[in-house]
Image (spheres, rainbow, N blue to C red):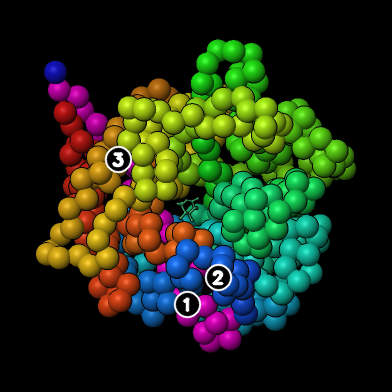
Amino acid sequence: MTRSYRFPDDFLWGAATSAYQIEGSPLADGAGPSIWERFAHTPGMMHNGDTGDVACDHYRRYREDVQLMKALGLAGYRFSINWARVLPEGTGRVNPKGLDFYSRLVDELLESGIAPHATLFHWDLPAALDDRGGWLNRDIAHWFAEYAQVMFKALDDRVKHWTTLNEPWVVTDGGYLLGGVAPGHRSKYEAPLAAHNLMRASGAGIQAYRAHGRHQVGVVFNIEPKYPATESPEDLAATRRAHAYMNEQFADPALLGSYPPELKEIFGDAWPDFPAGDFELTCQRPDFVGINYYTRAVVRHDPAQYPLKASPVRQPQATYTETGWEVYPQGLTDTLTWFKGRYGDLPLYVTENGAAFYDPPVAEGEVLEDPLRTGYLRKHLKALHAAIEAGVNLKGYYAWSLLDNLEWSLGYAKRFGLYHVDFATQKRTPKASAKLYAQVIASNGAALDD
Ligand code: BGC
């Protein structure tokens, strides 16, 4: 029996990147340092001592990279803005050269018929703001709104999709609880404060957009569905907590104006009593929500880690990526349908989805074969189609990532790109997954037909 995977006619096919991961030249043309610039230059923080100093050299090669997007047939490109390029001190003085880079990028995209989707915060907080307490300082909601206004005024005539924050969970879990990403703190007292201020800032950014913008603004969450290892009451409760901690801690204040009750159990005396008035700010209705989906977790209660964490259970028959994530396409369908059920019928985008599998540092030939990534892409696009069939109002998909890039503290060793990057020469080579994606785009999904 044949199955058709045609997508709706207006479905937007895109790819995504972020500033620190691809741009390089982090201090060029008057930019201020970000916390990632600092973190990457702190000995011992990065795999192999890698930094974003050069990355994909996109700051200088952006025209060439837009041509790669064009070759794929992309209709949309999701990138992020390095706040400290535009406001070197985080607030106040605007650096015209930094602003100009993003303006030129947007023009280049539009000339190639690619719709820009700009993310205001993808983890590279200006270091000057970290010196004032960063996400722990409640004033950051105002600092963020000020920066957002600068960007809206400069680019909203050309950018029709804006995102306030990318994946606040990673910022708080990695940056404030476990310390594996910038700013590298380890405190269960700080993590909920940082999380709350992130969502206050996102709300303030959406408010600013209502005053200055004419198109659409949203927020991006990484959602990792949690499944219990067994039906035991302990595993079910641990699964519920893991889900509240990773998924609902951010989407609930943004979309429901409250926190799930499990967070009190998880954080104990470290969970603050937030002022009730804060939820008016966090709960600003976005025009869309972006969901980043990579994997799922199967959860088992672990007394040693209770109540903050639980143990993930490895699945013996599954494929795992190079970052140790189970390939589980059904989780994408489940996530999208769950999101609609809990938060209502908002327009949704999958704003990131992809996989790191081993590719050699040098690509030989015209196309680099990457069967595992190609398989991942094919299966996840089918899972996406299933979500649309189930009634999810899904508007588009951005593959992660356009290019191999700096996988944060894991450095350049983990490759997620549709295009291979030889970091010694900056040569870009399409992978077979890029070829498949181009066919899917050209046929609006029909290339996936069985
Ligand atoms: C982030 C990206 C990252 C990707 C793969 C997401 O958590 O938004 O910046 O490279 O996943 O780990």
Counting residues from the start of the chain, the first of labels 2 and 3 encountered is: 2
Q: Which mark is residue 53?
A: 1
At 80% from the left and 60% from the top, the residue drawn is 137
Is there a contact, CB below 8 Å, between mark 2 and mark 1?
yes
Q: Is residue 267 above or below residue 172?
A: above
Q: Which stretch appears magenta?
A: 2-31
Q: Which quarter of the rendered picture does the C terminus lie within?
A: top left
Residue 190 appears at what percent x and percent y?
77, 51
Disc 2: which residue: 40
In this image, 174 relative to 395: left or right?
Answer: right
The quarter of the displayed image where residue 114 is located? bottom left
**Magenta segment includes 12:** yes
* Magenta stretch secondary structure, dominant: loop
Quarter of the image where the N terminus is located: top left
Residue 420 percent location from the top left of the image: 27, 62
Is residue 384 at all visible to an observer of this figure? no
For badge 1, the amino acid type reads Asp
Q: Is residue 138 magenta?
A: no
**233 left or right of 78 in image:** right
Q: Which residue is painted at 65% across and 41% down in the image? A: 250
Residue placed at 36% from the left, 36% from the top?
Answer: 327
For marks 2 and 1, give the one nearer the viewer. 2
Mark closer to the chain start, 2 or 1: 2
The residue sitting at 56% across, 53% down in the picture is 166
Label 2: how many Cα within 10 Å (few below 14, some 14–19, many 20+):
many
How many angstroms separate mark 2 from mark 3 (CA)? 30 Å
Q: In the rendered picture of this protein, how many numbered marks are placed on residues? A: 3
Q: Which residue in the protein does label 3 denote?
A: 376
